[in-house]
Amino acid sequence: MKSILITGGTGLIGKSFIKSLDNNDFEIYVLTRSGSRVEDGINYINWNPENGQLDLSGIKQIHYVINLAGASIDGSRWSKNYKNKILSSRINSTKLLFKKIKELDTKPELYIGASATGYYKKNTIFQQDEKDLKGKDFLSNVVEKWEKESFEFKKLGIRTAIFRIGLVLSEKGGVLKKLYPIFKYFLGVPIGSGKQTISWIHINDLIDMIKESIVNKEYNGVYNGVAPNVITNEKFTHELSKVLNRPSYPSFLKAPSFIIKLFFGELSSLVLNGVNVSSKKIQNAGFKYSYESVDSALENIYNNQ
């Protein structure tokens, strides 16, 4: 039985990934800030990236490392302190993980690192792929530094795959959990111009990408974790309204940009600026999507509640 070491196991992606695993196929180890324990067949190991606390000596051999750790980018207004937390939570956790993995006599076969489509330039007409240059904003710089730390694992001879993840669609968390009550009470309208692009992915497809990278040894380097069909904020609003049986309002009804900026500050850039990202690389690697269109993704999510 092979083992998987997971960071960020309590987040949306981490929880979904762990739930998708069979305990009979893998020995699962999850790094946590709470106490070490065994729960539902999963081994939880205490760690603290800020003070360098992590002991992997209790694991006989680690075959796969899945690094999903990092403070939520929309967890708070982007004060100077919170922006530092967004960056340091990713850098410190990855550096500590690298340090401890480097000390192991037998190295893992694979390192999978989370990343984000925030790497790219915003509001482009053309689709950007993995070879394109990064943007110049805060998130672009965070992602660049984050990926640099992840690629250190490659220097240890470990196959390394990094997923630049788009907007993840799931009823259990993320943007849909925040939007549901707004749309439920008939308040769902496009934001700003409504023309900003959204590169999104159904949670199940993202989990399948991670699993595919485990079994397919051709997966190396950076991949955009997005669906093939990029949409606008206006289109997304329309499709979400439809699946929730809510009306689509006239096109002139939108949440004004200045109101969003007033309430959310710099954080508002997440919804006022679009990212147009290509999925061709991972499709060329043979990955097959279950949800290529946003309407099929939303129907699956809300018809299976």
Image (cartoon, helix red, strand yellow):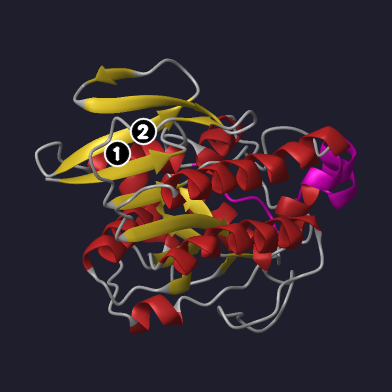
At x 74%, y 69%, the residue is 122
Which residue does the image show at 90% across and 39% down from the upper left?
A: 262
Nearer the N terminus, badge 2 or badge 1?
A: 1
- The label shown at residue 30 is 2
Asked if residue 262 is positioned above or below residue 218 in the image, the reply reads above
Q: Position of residue 188 (x, y in %)?
A: 63, 42
| SS assignment at label 2 | strand
* Residue 165 shows in this picture: no
Q: What is the spatial separation of the Cα atoms under label 2 and label 1, in whole angstroms?
A: 9 Å
Residue at disc 1, secondary structure: helix
* Residue 37 lies within the magenta run: no
Near mark 2 (Cα within 10 A), the count class, few <14, some 14-19 or many ≥20, is many
Highlighted magenta segment, given as a residue range? 246-267
Above or below for 293 versus 45 = below
42 w.r.t. 122: above or below? above
Residue 18 got which mark?
1
Q: Are marks 2 and 1 in contact (CB under 8 Å)?
A: yes
